[in-house]
Amino acid sequence: MLSGMTDGHPGDMTRERMAELLSWASDGKLTVEEILSAECTLPALGVDSLTYIRLIDAIDDEYGVDVDMGGNAAHLDTVDGLVRHVAEARSRAGRPPDVHRTTTERPRTPEEMT
């Protein structure tokens, strides 16, 4: 679990956690540092459809939020877009918008999800 915010911005811890999930979903092909420092979209960074599927499963597992890949999926293009989407979905559901871990210390593996 993360120790705290990095520079005082309230979304930093969540942003870091989202980057950790994304790194996990990419099987470590992308590091947290690469994801957080990227100045391009996630697809331009190399995030493929399998990584998105694993990320969406991890977000659902960890935060209880469904992420729809259909329609206007612009929220999937950046870490900040994903963080906003999760916070807004939690707020609409009457849960605190400041997203935090609610389950295990790590995302479940695909084998554990079946």
Image (tube, helix red, strand yellow):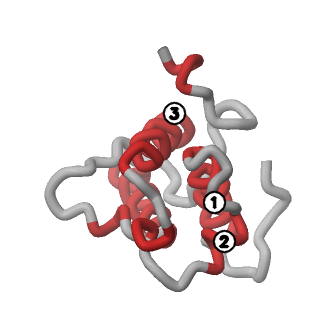
Q: What residue do we see at 18% from left, 63% from top?
A: 72
Q: What residue do we see at 65% from left, 44% from top?
A: 101
Q: Nearer the viewer, mark 2 or mark 3?
A: 2
- Which label belongs to residue 34? 2
Asked if disc 3 and disc 1 are in contact, CB closer than 8 Å, the reply is no
Tell me the crowding category of disc 3: few under 14, some 14 to 19, or many 20 or more residues within 10 angstroms, Cα based.
some
Q: Amino acid at mark 2?
A: Glu
Instruction: Tell me the SS state at disc 3.
Output: helix
Asked if disc 1 and disc 2 are in contact, CB closer than 8 Å, the reply is yes
Give the left or right position of residue 7, taking residue 58 as reference: right
Spatial distance from mark 2 to mark 3, Cα to Cα? Answer: 24 Å
Spatial distance from mark 3 to mark 1, Cα to Cα? Answer: 21 Å
- Residue 38, percent across and down? 58, 79
Q: Which residue is mark 3?
A: 61
Give the left or right position of residue 111, taking residue 67 as reference: right
Q: Amino acid at mark 1?
A: Leu
Tell me the crowding category of disc 2: few under 14, some 14 to 19, or many 20 or more residues within 10 angstroms, Cα based.
few
- Which label belongs to residue 44? none
- Residue 85, percent across and down? 39, 61
The quadrant holding residue 32 is bottom right
Q: Nearer the viewer, mark 3 or mark 1?
A: 1
Give the left or right position of residue 5, taking residue 114 as reference: right
The quadrant holding residue 8 is bottom right
Q: Which residue is mark 1?
A: 30
